[in-house]
Image (cartoon, rainbow, N blue to C red):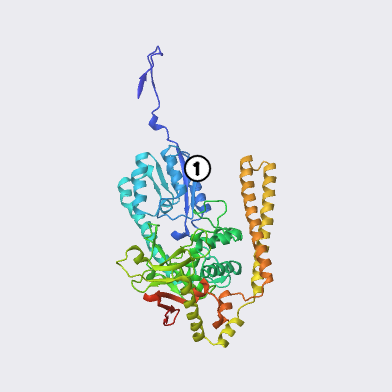
Amino acid sequence: MCYFDYKNMSGGLFVLPNHTDIKKKYRAALYIRLSKEDGDKAESNSVTNQRELMYRFLEDKDDIQVCEEKVDDGYSGVGFERPALTSMLEDVKQGRINCIIVKDLSRFGRNYIETGRYIQQIFPFMGVRFIAVNDHYDSEHADSQTDNMILPFKNLMNDSYSRDLSIKIRSQIEVRQKRGDYIGSFPVYGYFRDQERKGKLVIDSAAAEVVRDIFDLRIRGCSNRKIAEYLNEHGVPSPMEYKMLLHWRYTTSFKLKPQAKWSPVAVERILKNEIYTGVMVQGKERTLNYKVKKRIKVSKEDWIRVEDTHEAIITKADFAVVQKLLLCDTRTAPDRIKVYLFSGLLRCGGCGGNMVRRKIRSAKGEYCYYICSSHKRDKSVCSSHRIREDFLSKAVLELIRTHLSLIATMDELQEIIAKIPLQEQKVKKRYRQLEERRGELARCRKLKISVYKDYKEALLTKREYFEMKEEYEDSCRQLEEAIKTLEREVSLLAKERKFHSPRIERLKEKGNISELDRGLLAMTVEEIVVMNSGHIAVRFQYRDAFVRER
């Protein structure tokens, strides 16, 4: 293009350089992705290998300046919700980079539709140069007609590879599950991974004691909320905190507070987990397909269930009793620790509905009785089935005595009792828990001191110091309270000389049981049916009903 130089009196012409002749400079981002889920070979697709390959490619590319590196390590190429990729695309929007370089097309993505949309539509529209080194693709020098044929084909091959790999992985996982191998990322609370047998579990004695306590407390009538409170009062680390104490690389989005406490939900999760009976139950959830990572529930009949894959912590009989209790309406009043004695066990002989407890106050005093809930709501639905609590207790107690005399001889009961450890075992367990809490308290105090040293050395800000100091002080206070509670229990237990299990302690008396408790009822009674005129029918566990009249 020619311009006249008016300042040049000779009227000569000069030529300005054409701007299209200036080589465009590109601000580039190197994108690196590695995923074992995609079947990547650790050596050929390692982060270091991809980086070196791209820098060698750029050695003679003076028009490209690397501004940043983005690395997604451990993310599948099927989905595009990857942190480094999202950050890089945001930089593209903001104009910070206008060139993206990858080792090959599969590093950018394995989703046929999404990968093609970015490379053939979005990036050209935004003026972004895209380079896939091993696929010899550079959008600046691309032949549009050829690329319109080759690019979709390559993307389709990458997509197909992911689909086939996903099918193979699913098949391998299912084979291992049916074999009884545990495939979870972390072993369930109460177990460790067996270091000698891959895919097998062994009992973690410390956590297993807590699991047994939880089941025992539930059978004795404590609600999930009361069990959680009991564990927190005794300073027992929750499953989440226990993983942290073991230095497992465990993270979760459910932790809302610095220290995770036991909750009714956590207690119920343990009570419902059949793995504690030695049964491996897996395959409860699955993904929709290899592109959609959202998990969906699998119907119970399709779960993969393998018997006797590991040592049980809870007997199947105790587990069955607890599942029955969880189905009952066993809520506790705010001022009570345990549920009422017959809660969830009474049925109306007329309509089959639940019986509700009522308290009556009169001039002669007060007494409690149970009445049909349907009759209470609408007298036309069912006739008045009711029974006084004191009579019910006496009648059921006598029937249990009779029942026990029929199901076992004294010799059999004595044999069972001989296998039960003495009370000293419980004392030893409490002593062990006491020592664990004291150790945790000592560690917590040391951490508190170390935080102060970090603050003095300017490694922490004043705000960070006070926040961490308050957190450790709170943990110390809770541990101190737990230690006091355990010390009281150890002191009381040391004075007693009874058998470990209160249920067996009563069973050994057989015909001389003097009172009912929730644990004894839960272990022996399936259902109590209240009929007209004060008749009751008691259906025992695995036995026909015994009937008694007033």
Left or right, residue 400 beside residue 493 = left
Left or right, residue 403 beside residue 18 = right
- In this view, the residue in front, 185 or 175, is 185
- In this view, the residue in front, 457 or 530, is 530
Q: Amino acid at mark 1?
A: Glu
Across and down, in percent, residue 414 comes to 59, 84
Instruction: Mark yes or no: residue 35 visible.
Output: yes
Across and down, in percent, residue 262 comes to 54, 59
What residue is drawn where x is 34% and y is 48%? 117
- Quadrant containing the C terminus is bottom left
Q: Secondary structure at mark 1?
A: strand
Task: Name which quarter of the figure residue 98 lies in.
Answer: top left
Task: Name which quarter of the figure residue 164 lies in.
Answer: bottom left
Left or right, residue 156 beside residue 236 = left
- Quadrant containing the N terminus is top left
- In this view, the residue in front, 348 or 344, is 348
Across and down, in percent, residue 318 comes to 50, 74
Q: Is residue 544 above or below residue 248?
A: below
For label 1, the residue is 68
Across and down, in percent, residue 7 comes to 41, 13
Return the residue found at the far top. Answer: 9
Return the residue found at the far front. Answer: 363
Q: How many marks on residues? A: 1
- In this view, the residue in front, 138 or 121, is 121
Instruction: Mark yes or no: residue 431 visible.
Output: no
What residue is drawn where x is 45% and y is 44%? 88
Disc 1: CA contacts within 10 A as few (<14), some (14-19) or many (>=20): few
Q: Is residue 111 above or below residue 490?
A: above
